[in-house]
Amino acid sequence: MGAEHCIAVLYTNCNVSVRSFAFKLLICALCLNAPVTKETLAQAPLLTVPVAEYLWERRRVSHRGRSHSEILHKQMAERRLLVLFGSQTGTAQDTAERIGREAKRRHFRCRVEALDSYRVAQLIQELLVVFVCATTGQGDPPDNMKNFWRFIFRKNLPPASLCQMDYAVLGLGDSSYPKFNFVAKKLHKRLQQLGASPILPVALGDDQHDLGLDAVVDPWLLDLWGRILPLYPLPPGLGIIGPDVLLPSKFTLHFLEEHSSGCDGGQSRQEAARQAPSELRPFAAQMVSNQRVTAESHFQDVRLIEFDVTGSGIEYQAGDVLMVQPRNAPEDVQQFCQLLRLDPERCFVLKPSEPGTPLPAHLPQPCTIQHLVACYLDISCVPRRSFFELLSWFSPNELEREKLQEFSSAQGQEELCSYCSRPRRTTLEVLCDFPHTACAVPVDYLLDIIPRIQPRAFSIASSMLALPNRLQILLAVVQYKTRLSKPRRGLCSTWLASLNPQQGDVRVPLWVKRGGMKFPAEPDTPIIMIGPGTGVAPFRAAIQERVAHGRKGNYLFFGCRQKSKDFYCRAEWQELVKSGHLTLFTAFSRDQEEKIYVQHRIRENKGLVWDLLSRGNAHIYLAGNAKQMPAAVAEALKSMFQLEGDLSPSEAEEYLTALERSHRFQMETWS
């Protein structure tokens, strides 16, 4: 067995530090002109792809008179880092881009991509990868990593598939949810099963920490570079680019001579209709109605909104989700352009600063400043730490610059939290507080400083069988108070609520994605639905669908504050009860002195519920706010199992787990 084969086996079967040493041994052996034969390579089945390619490259080019030092220089120049993220709200993407910036300061060739945008088949060729993953719902992966998630857990993947990869996993989660950082933990374990070597233990950021996610991210990043740089030393003569040097922007805006008349062009409605609507190609659906379904005196404004999707090609079923791409309010767009001294009518094309950087898929080319600000830049989001770090570079005012630098420092995170995160101060409001800086921001850095507006998800509240070519959602308009004088408002819900289809043709960009809830296909299977508040939306769709098929056995536990103020779809439920298609249990928490919630109604009707589960093979569904309600309902169910099924506490826990595993207990919750 040749020396190169021994070194290759050592490389692929040992930990990171030994592998680094083995790789250097291999390079030295080749520089000393050790023989490389076809037989040698054939004896090394565990030889990593990049090293094997190097060996063959050396063998092939040696006949052309190229020196070994040329190949060595090429190989050592491959200081590549891949940063892959799964992000639902943009936080994981922001952290991934921060890692990318730090990598560039250390002279790595670094790519930052969403997991589903990356060609996953190439993963076997990657040597160094950092994964940044959020967890959504009840331990689900974010939308932009679901395809990757399905692939990486395929049972036919060989156990040594990723044996050449060094990796690190950073999870971003919220410990108030039951499956805290579930995706990061599971991914870390799976990568090890496939032979990859962790550089660090999995890191679990917690949004509940007083300092937020940075309490974990900051020290983890220091450890990360402390592990990576010994494996991939800086090139000779180069040092880490210090924080006093501004990195180039990702894109440059090249302004055109013409104004907005020729810009923001896209597909016509007829062209778009020939393709299935998606995030990249949303359908401009006409809003047909926008009806308030809570009393005017009620504190919460809830709307039943209906869209006409005729000609869109959209098909959906109960449990599916409507995605809406919101827009900034016109007055906010105008204020932003005035603050930054931007001409909204100017037209530009984007060009990447580095070759190979993909352009933002959601921006038309060419584009106007008006469209960029109204439809792309999330000026209403609460800015993250990276926003203040980049903004400080452009401040001509000493006081403003010092404050921005403080907010972006590790020591200033408590003050930043007090200024920004707790009161939910928006990006636009921060720019108003730093006027000298705002007007000095170079336009090329807008896409680095401000993230893209993320689409919003809403459970579909109707069935195509009941309403052909129509789609309805139940929307709670988000509005709340903080210590700031101006109420906080949700971007998408406020925008949708402001639209009045009676005043003209109102269009909303939307598409449908498959939901996590699956309702039984068997006609005789009863379903128990627990949906307080707007959590009732997917169950309205399911009931409409089942009634259209003539199915009974529909049991709904609905909860709200007051029967007279927020009993959504009251008349519809009452008609279904009369016709025998629905059994309804209501909990009006504020209509009596002692608060009553859906979990209390479950306990009161434990005999019926247990009988449906144990004898009728019923399925249970739960939807609504993720904070306290799911845990309270789960406790009510386990109590019922013990009392009616004569199970011990541990057996009741296992029974509920078994229902989840068999998909007879499904949840869809949101914060």
Image (spheres, rainbow, N blue to C red):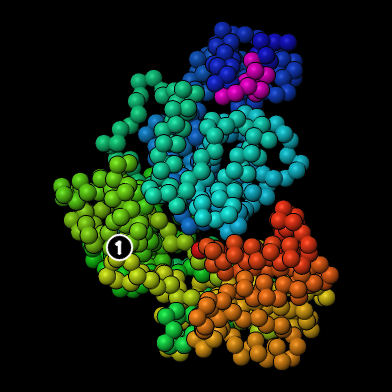
Viewer-closest of 639 and 340: 639
474 vs 494, left or right, is right
Residue placed most toward the observer, 653 or 627: 653
Q: Residue at x 62, y 73 (%)?
A: 600
Q: Taking the image as drawn, is residue 610 in sight? A: yes
Q: Is residue 584 left or right of residue 362?
A: right
Tell me the residue at 22%/60% (across/down): 433
Q: Which image quarter holds the N terminus? A: top right
Stretch in magenta: 7-16
The three-letter amino acid code for the residue at tag 1 is Leu
Prevailing secondary structure class for the magenta stretch in the rendered image: helix
Q: Position of residue 122 (x, y in %)?
A: 62, 39
Residue at position x 47%, y 27% in the image: 227
Identify the residue under disc 1: 428
Q: Is residue 576 left or right of residue 175?
A: right
Q: Position of residue 201 (x, y in %)?
A: 54, 34
Q: Is residue 416 above or below residue 339?
A: above
Q: Position of residue 107 (x, y in %)?
A: 40, 31
Sort mark 1 into few (<14), some (14-19) or many (20+) by Cα contacts within 10 Å.
many
Vertical side of 25 occupied by 311: above or below: below
